[in-house]
Image: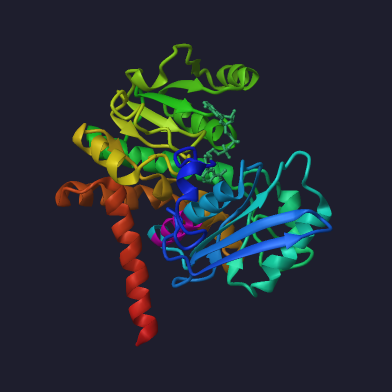
Amino acid sequence: MVSDVIHANELYKVDPVFGQISFNNHEQIVFCNDKDTGLKAIIGIHNTVLGPALGGTRMWNYNNEWEALNDVLRLSRGMTYKSAVTGLNLGGGKAVIIGDAKTQKTPELMKKFGEFVNGLSGKYITAEDVGMETADMDLVREVTPYVTGISESKGGAGNPSPITAFGVYMGMKAAAKFKFGSDNLDGKSVLVQGIGHVGEALVDHLTKEGAKVIISDLNQERLEAVSKTYGASIYNGNDLYSESVDIYAPCALGATVNNDTVNKIQAKIIAGAANNQLANEQEHGLILQERGIVYAPDFLINAGGIINVYAELEGYGKQEIMRKTENIYNTTLDILTNAEVNGITTHEAALQVAKARIENRKKENNK
Ligand code: NAD
């Protein structure tokens, strides 16, 4: 979700674009403006060594343009490493549209955005993110082929959330194997924070395996419905991070592992779907390592969604999507083991794999 770690005042102090705290040698940043539709968007292309930069479009009512720029820079960088560590031939990109998706999103605005995407001739391929629906991508598809996440009836791969949830489940089982010596989650207590599209599907997998699932969400109605459907218990304390559980699964917002929470967390494993779970990747990753808490890197285990949309480009089917997503288990186990052997954080270990893949491809391309 939108960054809540970097405040606008800090952002003003640096150069407008290349000096931004989240600028990370991005290849291209495109600012899009259209007076008639009110479109104001930023497309961030972080890295295209492995392939076209693929990443969703987020529509959010940012407090200011700095926040929007910061978000697109962070998110596009994250996509580079997510695809690289997953073994996909994709680069990293992301787009943000500044505005309220509920009141300011119109078909004209979406099509205009599509025209900007089209102007990049396939260097950036878009998809859905927060504030976007499949129907919006169908509108973008009317003006450009460089879009994924479109309706199944139009050749799309359908809703990515169940696939994302399956990948998170695989990553969680690998973390359990690493920490407890067995990947069997029967009887393990798992606290799922956020039972939206991904969280609910994760609860389904977990309860089927016999895990003791505790759920938390801001939406009371949803909590009651999910609790009834799956027999999960509703968290009713006031300090979720201090709850003594085996596994904490952040499936709502990013940056929940932060200065306020990192020393309180009692779970033995952190494995969830939310992007950018560590407010500070180095600092908080290190504290988790020192405290013996196994952190399954978010960008590794939540890659099911990108695997799903990649199918639209490569033309593979459901079976291959599931095989690739199931493989998140093996990759996670390898990375957790590497981190231990090399005495580095699990986040760093996953980054190293992603970066090595990009460097190798660069060398091959330069031969
Ligand atoms: P969603 O919007 O469907 O669900 C999010 C849920 O979290 C909602 O039910 C919301 O009420 C709840 N929530 C918000 N703030 C909360 C809080 N403070 N405490 C508890 N609950 C809170 O989103 P989703 O599609 O299920 O995605 C969940 C997370 O996974 C997001 O961070 C998203 O970026 C990430 N993610 C999703 C996908 C995907 O395929 N959908 C892929 C990769 C990553």
Asked whether, in this view, residue 105 is left or right of residue 18, the answer is: right
Would residue 197 be seen by someone viewing this image from the given angle? yes
Q: Quadrant of residue 156?
A: bottom right
Q: Residue at x 31, y 26 (%)?
A: 267
Q: Quadrant of residue 187?
A: top left
Q: Position of residue 202 (x, y in %)?
A: 50, 34
Percent x, y for residue 179? 24, 35
- Total tally of numbered discs in the picture: 0
Left or right for 330, reference 205:
left
Magenta stretch encompasses residue 82: yes
Q: Residue at x 34, y 88 (%)?
A: 367
Percent x, y of residue 43: 60, 61
Q: Is residue 123 left or right of residue 334?
A: right
Is residue 130 rendered to the left or right of residue 360?
Answer: right
Q: Nearer the viewer, residue 198 or 351?
A: 351
Q: Is residue 323 visible?
A: no
Main SS class of the magenta portion in the image:
helix
Q: Farthest residue toward the bottom?
A: 367
In which quadrant of this rendering is ligand 1 seen? top right
Q: Residue at x 49, y 42 (%)?
A: 9
Above or below, 282 relative to 116: above
Rendered image coloring scheme: rainbow
Look at the picture and state if 327 lies above or below 310.
above
Q: Residue 127: x and y, percent? A: 63, 56
Q: Is residue 295 above or below residue 318?
A: above
Q: Is residue 18 magenta?
A: no
Asked where in the image residue 249 lies, by quadrant, the reply is top left
State the residue lying farthest toward the front: 13
The range drawn in magenta is: 76-84
Query: In the displayed structure, would residue 186 be above or below residue 14?
Result: above
